[in-house]
Image (spheres, helix red, strand yellow):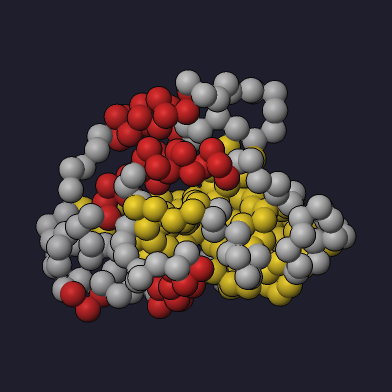
Amino acid sequence: MTKPNLFAVTLILWAGVSTSVAADTEAPKVPVLLELFTSEGCSSCPPADRLLEALDQKQPIPGADLIVLSEHVDYWDRLGWKDPFSSPQYTARQQDYTNKFNLDGVYTPQLVIDGRFGLVGSDSREASAAILRAVRERKVPIEISNVVSDRHQVSAHIELHGDPSIKTGPAVLYLAIADNRAESQVVRGENSGRSLAHVAVTRVLKQFGAVDLDTASVREVTLLGHAAASGSRLIVFLQDPRSGHILGVSVRKL
């Protein structure tokens, strides 16, 4: 697979949207969750990792606040290289999306946008088109405050604004801690000899119960985990357990 230049990727993303969408600096941006299912054992994954980094850093889609997560699956681990960031939890989460999308099976790299659209993780044109569709959806505002992080845990005050117009039934509240950046020197498998870098690497992902979207609510939450040396971020999102759609998402740097 051809490896796109990071600058070229960003230009492609802009070209795909600038002709049809005018950026309005006054209008609030709609948060969109991007989940990349990836693996250091997969030779097709590094271009997707770089695309996710470009989306995170450049924020090239007008009207969208792109909030990203790298979720490293573990089914490549038996093929020569054990990804140090992999977890069966992320494999199970990807499988759940696979079932909801009625796909034949899991694959990497896969980019899931707002729990609504799944696509090849290195396809910048398809990603920009899906993000533009995602920003049209209503989102429940989520406010994160009073964040405290120490060596063992992260605590935060979460305010969830009600929105009775979203007719989905109770949503599931998720919290994630992700390293801003992580790197590996791969010595075996398909990427042997390569130095790989990743953005927003998920280290903790936990459910915090159901939320009634009809009314506002407040949660005081504590999550085991700590900020990495490279810096970390706390991501909070609401997900419809039936459709998998992301109904609200917010992020705070730790």
Which residue: 71% across, 74% down?
A: 209
Rendered position, 79 above or below 254: below
Image position of 202 with respect to 82: above or below: above
Whole-percent x, y for residue 159 in the image? 79, 56
Inspect this view and state whether residue 182 appears: no
Residue at 47 percent of width and 72 percent of height: 99
Asked whether the viewer can see residue 37, the reply is yes
Quarter of the image for residue 187 reads: bottom left
The front one of 177 and 66 is 66
Instruction: Report the residue at 16% width, 73% height from top.
Output: 80
**Residue 141: % across, % down:** 74, 49
Of residues 218 and 122, the one drawn nearer to the viewer in this rendering: 122
In the rendered structure, the answer to whether residue 151 lies left or right of residue 24 reads left
- Give the quarter of the image for residue 245: bottom right
Q: Is residue 19 above or below residue 60?
A: above
Total number of numbered labels? Answer: 0
**Residue lying furthest right in this view?**
215
Residue 124 spot, x, y in % from top left: 36, 40
Q: Report x, y in % for residue 88.
A: 40, 78
Q: Nearer the viewer, residue 87 or 119?
A: 119
Q: Quadrant of residue 150?
A: bottom right
Give the residue displayed 47% in from the left and 21% down from the top.
19
**Relative to 35, is 210 on the left or the right?**
right
